[in-house]
Image (cartoon, grey):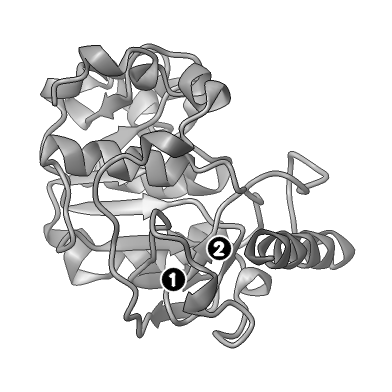
Amino acid sequence: MAAARKQTLRQRVWDSLENSDAVLFPRPCHGRIPNCPGSAAACQHLLQMPEIQVARVVKVHPSIGAAALRTALVMAGKTVLVPPYPGASYLYLLLHRDLCPNQRSLEWAGDKREYMKWARPLKLLEIPAVDVVIVATCVAAPNGVRLGKGKGYGEVEWGILTELGAAGASVPVYTLCHDLQLVGSEELPEELMESHDLPVDAIATPSGLVRCKRSAPKPSGVRWDLVGPDLEEDIGALRSPAALPW
């Protein structure tokens, strides 16, 4: 029942974005993390947060809509961790301005077509402590409940980071999305969350920033019972659990 309600909400938001012509390439946005106009404005709201400004290491999801944020963070001298293409044998690529070969690379550092040329793959034990996590969103509410595509990538990554000791409950988790992706807390109540679901502490949209009033705890550890063949294939670090460092 919860899964059906979540999917109904995703479908409604995807439809609303398409019907309002509030989404960019790739289209249709159904089944994807939407890439919407105004994402750069939403990024600016995140960049003004004190937690972001003092952060040294920020993990950012790889979707197109976060490209402006990734670029701004690299240009500000932050270390940015971003997942590679599905199927890679490592969990993150490390982006930093010192790795950029020239000024143009720096100015486009958050674009996947650019950073794949020079970003450094990280072994699991090389992953540094993360100060802020930015997760992808299809639907979000002011109570901190968010829905991704339903694949569980963000939750598994968070689980691995907590197993490594690189993240924990005190690490702020943020997201950015279009205003049409924001719904009321009564439509996306905490009761719909499962034990592995990762809530967010703030939501940035083009029109402003929402500090979430959440009570749901952040999970810890990897729920191996939820890791199927598709996740193992897409997140290479999961392919050999016996080889993981815990």
- Residue 71 point in image, percent of width and height: 37, 41
Dot 1 corresponds to which residue? 203
Q: Nearer the viewer, residue 187 or 203?
A: 187
Examine the image and state in which quarter residue 230 appears.
top right
Q: Are marks 2 and 1 in contact (CB under 8 Å)?
A: yes
Q: Nearer the viewer, residue 105 or 126?
A: 126
List x then y, in percent, for residue 99: 22, 20
Q: Position of residue 166 (x, y in %)?
A: 13, 41
Question: Quick one: quadrant of the C terminus?
Answer: top left
The residue positioned 48% from the left and 42% from the top of the image is 67
**Secondary structure at numbered mark 2:** loop
Instruction: Note whether 134 is above or below 152 in the view shown.
Output: below
Total count of labels: 2
Instruction: Give the residue pinned by disc 2.
Output: 177
161 sits to left or right of 235: left
Q: Residue at x 57, y 41 (%)?
A: 151
Q: Where does residue 171 sit, x and y in percent of width and height?
A: 18, 59
Query: Image point 25% across, 70% down: which residue?
Result: 49
**Dividing the image into 4 quarters, which one contains the N terminus?**
bottom right
Residue at x 47% of width, y 77% of height: 190
Q: Is residue 98 left or right of residue 190?
A: left
Q: Amino acid at mark 1?
A: Ile
At numbered mark 1, what does the secondary structure look like: helix, strand or loop? strand
With respect to residue 149, does 4 lie above or below? below
